[in-house]
Image: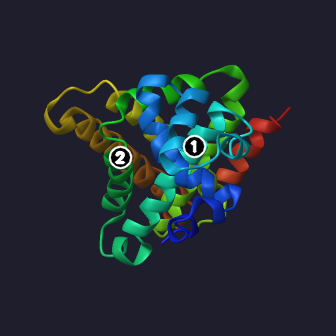
């Protein structure tokens, strides 16, 4: 259980706890008001929080609200799908389950999601959006049991972040029964990554020791004369 969930009286919450407590209601209000001050004030009123205090919890405005919403999903995902539970699954099922949990968590909030994607796409928010996407991808891989510390650590997270972003773009406009089109899209993307990983493993295994990834990347940076 998150610390914010343990503290039920808003007056006793820190600003970090308050932002997590208010985020779900802000997201619900964002369906109609966007990620605006109006949405924040609506959530604060429902929670019985002073409006000025609520604003202090989100000094960065819309992007801070969206990041808090994503943080609540990260927390819920870790609680619902701990590593011990995922360990019983194959790796592709672990990743699929983690991404699907996140999709289920925003079901019914498609308009809030659409508006959040528009905010994150703004040039001034690009760096924050990339950092937030990376953080979620990193948590998913950690829950899935990934312990890579070499370049695979970065490539896995970059690939998963791109898959998740692409899946969200499909999800937000998906009107198929039970979001089946989104599920199929996600399965195809994960299957493609699994094929890529198998091919990469063949090229980097001892059986193909004449192929050196390090040497190859080095030559790209410092081509022979």
The secondary element bearing badge 1 is classed as helix
Q: Residue at x 31, y 24 (%)?
A: 173
Q: How many marks?
A: 2
Q: Residues within 10 Å of mark 1 (few under 14, many from 20)?
A: some
Q: Residue at x 31, y 66 (%)?
A: 90
Percent position of residue 92, x then y: 34, 57
Numbered label attached to residue 190: 2
Depth check, front residue: 99 or 198 = 99
| The C terminus sits in image quarter | top right
Q: Which residue is mark 1?
A: 133
Depth check, front residue: 29 or 167 = 29
Residue 112 seen by the camera: yes
Depth check, front residue: 51 or 25 = 51
Frontmost of labels 1 and 2 is: 1
Percent position of residue 80, x then y: 37, 66
Depth check, front residue: 130 or 200 = 130
């Amino acid at each position: 259980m998150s610390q914010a969930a343990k503290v039920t009286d808003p007056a006793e919450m820190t600003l970090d706890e308050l932002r997590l407590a208010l985020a779900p209601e802000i997201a619900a209000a964002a369906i109609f008001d966007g990620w605006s001050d109006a949405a924040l004030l609506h959530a604060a009123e429902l929670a019985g929080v002073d409006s000025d205090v609520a604003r202090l919890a989100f000094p960065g405005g819309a992007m801070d609200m969206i990041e808090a919403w994503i943080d609540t999903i990260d927390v819920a995902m870790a609680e619902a799908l701990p590593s011990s539970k995922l360990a019983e699954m194959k790796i592709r099922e672990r990743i699929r389950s983690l991404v699907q949990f996140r999709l289920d968590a925003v079901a019914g909030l498609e308009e809030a999601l659409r508006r959040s994607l528009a905010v994150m796409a703004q040039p001034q928010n690009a760096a924050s959006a990339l950092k937030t996407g990376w953080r979620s991808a990193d948590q998913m891989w950690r829950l899935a049991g990934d312990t890579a510390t070499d370049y695979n650590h970065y490539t896995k997270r970059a690939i998963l972040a791109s898959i998740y972003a692409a899946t969200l773009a499909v999800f937000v406009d998906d009107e198929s029964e039970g979001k089946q089109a989104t599920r199929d899209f996600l399965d195809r993307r994960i299957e493609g990554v699994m094929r890529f990983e198998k091919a990469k493993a063949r090229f980097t295994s001892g059986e193909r020791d004449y192929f050196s990834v390090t040497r190859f990347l080095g030559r790209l940076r410092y081509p022979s004369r």
